[in-house]
Amino acid sequence: MKKLTAVLGTGLTALAGSSVIRAWNYKPIPMEKADIEDYPVDVDKVLKHLAGAIQCKTISTEDDLTTDWSEFDKFHDFLDDAFPLIAKNCEKEIAGKASLIYRWPGKDPALEPMAFLSHQDVVPVAEGTEQDWDYDPWEGHCDGTYLYGRGALDMKNHLICVMEAVESLMEQGFQPDRDVYLLFGHNEEMISATCNGAQEIADTLKARGIRLDSTLDEGGAVLKVQVPLVIDTRLSAIGIGEKGQVNMKITLNTKGGHSSVAPFHSGMNDLADTIKDLEKHQFESRWLPFMSELVDRVARYGSLPVRAILVNFPVLRPLVQFVMTKIPEAASLVRTVYSVTMAEGSMQPNVLPQRPSITVNFRPLKGDSIDDCERHVREIIRYPDFELERWNEKEATELCSTSSRAYKAIEQVQAGMYPGHVAVIPYLVMGGTDSWHYADICDNCLRYAPFNVSPALLKTTHGTNERIPVDCIQDAVIFFREYCKLVSARD
Ligand SMILES: [Zn+2]
């Protein structure tokens, strides 16, 4: 017995020892660092330009006839004045109603061009909330710490910083090897707009036989993660794809009538059953390969105890996947999710509903198609007499490789800017972006906004007091500049 205990003890000690050694060696994978040029960024000038951009009320609407196009004209004129070198060196054209295509010619026309994407449009300020703002949402007021205004985070900040970066490269006499496109759609915020600007741009390029090496759009974000004794790093989450979306309206055919002759169950009961059934029977979770890379990259920046656990991640993976399905924010990464967002009964209090309905918004995960979503619904609903209508269909995109030149360039620039203190991770964008429309002409549609903005501040996007911290502007311009230099190079 003593002998057995001794053997067991030695075994466990050896195991623990080897775990500690493995955890010790489980460190960030060294990333190649870009040389970051020490060329000044005139932050005051960028802020002035951002304010000028915000002053153009480029609000998109579903129907072209109700859009105030003069605001888009004003914005285009503003860009010409604010960025004279871009106006001089780029070919500019309008696609669709007001989408912009700038082409900065490279030295070698045989190379596939690179592109920066942004959308020019913003959402309106909700009626009745104008007074809640600390400053006029259409002024671009800067109080020294933040610049306020509609579009300050989504995404005139991005568009203006890309323009600043390109303008300053031109100022320095830089000339790209490959063409650099700046592609700015005009109605990203309107999923169901009659003519999508980004699609018109992509179609224009496609008709010319152009394939893009890569695109960089909004989507992924910078996150500072500081949890004492667990992790302390900066995460640059690069959107390598986006989930799909579709709306489905499910209408039950039920018995109507006068509410004074009250049945035991009205059609609303059947509707409630349907909602409960849908919530109960969720999609199966799936572990897409990029998720392992995501966890691995983050884990390597953890403290030693954290690494000691996560070095064994392949064994723990099924458990982690299960736990993720219990956390709404995490569940979206591992399965198709959906929410019942609208419901309708009858039109009057004393009328029993004859055609009660619900609307369900789906976000399919890569691997589940929109048809799969419909099949799922049809299998679940227990009442056979129903109709199903679907609209605003967007399939989930392909996922881009994390070994493309463009992805590597992001890693290199971030590693050069924040040596030893940044984890670049692949990520899945939950909402929609203009990048979706470029799938036909580009395999590397990356989504990353290099602005260090806290999650709390990000919540002001589309809301009251949308604002951007002044101190994240300089790094964003530097990022775009260095990224442009790397990706526009021959190799
Ligand atoms: Zn946006």
Image: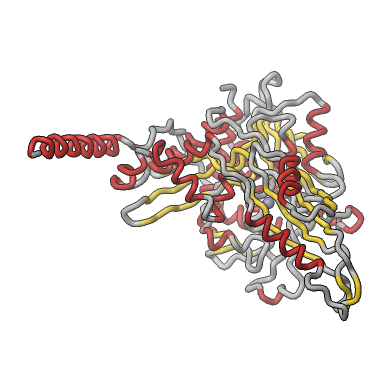
In the displayed structure image, the side of residue 116 where residue 300 appears, left or right: left
Query: Residue 323, percent across and down?
Result: 47, 50
Kindly tell me whether residue 79 is visible in this rendering.
no
Q: Residue at x 55, y 33 (%)?
A: 407
Name the quadrant containing residue 370: top right
Classify 136 as above or below 77.
below
Foreground of the two, 65 or 291? 291
| The C terminus sits in image quarter | top right
Which residue shows up at 63% across the image and 28% down it? Answer: 176
Q: Position of residue 143 (x, y in %)?
A: 57, 68
- Is 74 situated above or below 407? below
Given residues 243 and 345, the one toward you in this image is 345
x and y, in percent, of residue 201 in the image:
79, 37
| Rendered view: 55 above or below 285 | below
Which image quarter: residue 416?
Answer: top left
Is 12 placed left or right of 166 in the picture? left
Outermost bottom residue: 260
Residue, x 69% and y 70% (percent of image)? 136
Q: Nearer the viewer, residue 266 or 490?
A: 266
Task: State whether residue 90 appears in this view.
Answer: yes
